Each structure stands twice: as structure tokens, then as C-alpha cells.
Image: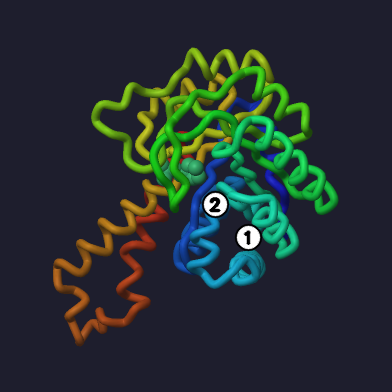
Amino acid sequence: KLVNAHNMVHAAYKGKYAIGHFNINNLEWTKAVLETAQKTNTPVIIATSEGAIKYMGGANVVVGMVNGLLEDLNITVPVALHLDHGQSVEAAKKCIEAGYSSVMFDGSHFSFEENYAKTKEVVEFAKQYGVSVEAEIGTIGGEEDGVVGKGELGDPEEAKKMVDLGIDFLAAGIGNIHGPYPANWEGLAFEQLKKIEDAINFPMVMHGGSGVPQSQVEKAISLGISKINVNTELQLSFQKATRAYIETGADQDMVKKGFDPRKLLKPGYDAIVSEMTNLITWF
Ligand code: G3H
Ligand code: ZN
């Protein structure tokens, strides 16, 4: 059974580690993430952007698939199903009604006042269902599924106001970027992260978790980061393994039935498992 993400993230905050949030795209992705979490005995957050939900057919499809896998694969570690970067109050409510156990309301493209008011509405609605809520202040640089940000750093006072609304964890702009990090990236804004942490003493979320060097991940965790969002890293691993499989011509081998879609998707599946195992070990 799905659980909300409050307890796992708050336990991580106290224990100075981080929970992995992994974006999924299809059945293979979801199965790989759940099996890896179970094998490593690690709580996990399965996340879908609005774009991924649309791709898979709708929120009910995602909820049905995840719940079915939890049961048939005998997954016993805590699993939360989370809406990533919900762009509207309506999108968050729809996912909650469909059975998501956690939602992010990303109002970072609104003024702070509007972001605050809309986050408040999501929190009030989510509480009735026992669903956890992530809010965002500042913006994340780069682009993810049509969500574009300039990378403004989060403000400690705004952070405090959000926390006082009763959210469960907070995403803040801390110099992080969605997608691969550019060669001239200046690294995470640790001074700002520390100012925010000092103002709230509350679990924070690091978006753009792909490609952050291990030393920076560790420092961020020591400064209150308790949930790390990863999307691009698993996509790159999947793509690389799938491409290699096709380029060796193994998919052309009729004797081995390499054209079977279940075989075609297997190397990518294995790559997700191995990359995710590395990542959660760090976190
Ligand atoms: O919300 C999802 C994450 O922020 C993913 O970022 O694609 O850079 O790993 P990433
Ligand atoms: Zn993100």
C-alpha cells in the first residue's frame, strides 16, 4: 500500500541522509525502481510530472500500475507516489483524488503571494486525504518537461512562510539545474542553502539531482537536503544501454529473438537498476 512521503523524508532529515525521488516513464521504469528499492531495503518516492502522466494515459493508469506492482511484486519497503512539479491546484487535486500519496505544487512561476495562496489551498485539500505536500520557492534553472526556470535562489523568509503553512518538505532554488549540468556550472549555492536551513530547520528537496558531484550531494545533505530528485540520470543510463544493444546488432539476431520488445527493453531496464543502486547508496 502506498504511503505519503512525510515520515520517510523527516526520518531522513533527522538521520542526515536523503530519500531518492525517481521520475518514471513506463512499466519497465516503474518495475526497475520498485525492485531496486525492495532489493536494497530502501524507502522510495516514485514521481511523475504532468507530462509523464499524460504520456502514460492519465493519473488512474499510473495509480493502477503502481498499486498493482506493489501487490504482485510483494514490495514491502515504504513507497510514495508523488506528483512532480504540479503546475496548477487542479492538477494536484486530480492526482490526490486518483490515489497519489504525495504532491508537489510548483507555484514558482507565480508571484510569491500567489504561490503562497495556491500552496495553502493544496495543503488544505491534501490534508483531508493524508497526502504529503512539497512547495517551491525561488526557481530551479533549466527545463524539465516544459517547466522552465531562471534559477533564482530561494529566500529564507519566504521559506519560513511556506513551512508555516503545514507543507511536508520544501524545494528551494539553490543553484541547482534540471537536466545535465553545463560545463560552466558554478555548483550549489551552499551559503544560501545554509541561510534557508537556519531559518526553517526543516527537510528540503534538491531538484536537478542528476550529475551533482558526490561531495556536493554530501554537503547538501548535511545542510538539510533530505529528498533528492533524479530524472535525467536514469534517462541517460537507459538511453545509453538501449543504444548500445541496438548498435551491436543484437536486436537483428532472429535466432535469439532480439526483436522481441521485452528483450529490446531489457538492457535499459538493467541500466536503470544499476544506476539507481549507485545513487541510493550515496544518498
Ligand atoms: O523534478 C525532478 C528533478 O528535479 C529531476 O532533475 O532531471 O536534473 O535529475 P534532473
Ligand atoms: Zn524538478
Q: Nearer the viewer, residue 117 or 178?
A: 117
Element at label 2: helix
Q: Which residue is mark 1?
A: 75
Res. 210 image quadrant: top left
Locate residue 266: give its quadrant.
bottom left
260 relative to 210, above or below: below
- Type of amino acid under label 1: Ile
For ligand 1, tell me if the residue under mark 2 lies within 8 Å. no
Disc with the residue nearer the chain's start (2 vs 1): 2
Asked if the residue at tag 1 contacts the one at tag 2, i.e. Cβ–Cβ closer than 8 Å, the answer is: yes
Mark 1 Cα shell of 10 Å, populated few (<14), some (14-19), many (≥20): some
| Residue 149 on image: x %, y % | 45, 37
Tag 2: residue type?
Answer: Ala
**From the image, which quarter does the N terminus lie in?**
bottom right
- Give the residue displayed 25% in from the left and 79% down from the top: 258
Q: CA distance from mark 2 to mark 1?
A: 9 Å
Quick check: which quadrant has ligand 1? Answer: top left
Residue receiving disc 2: 37
Residue 183 appears left or right of 100:
left
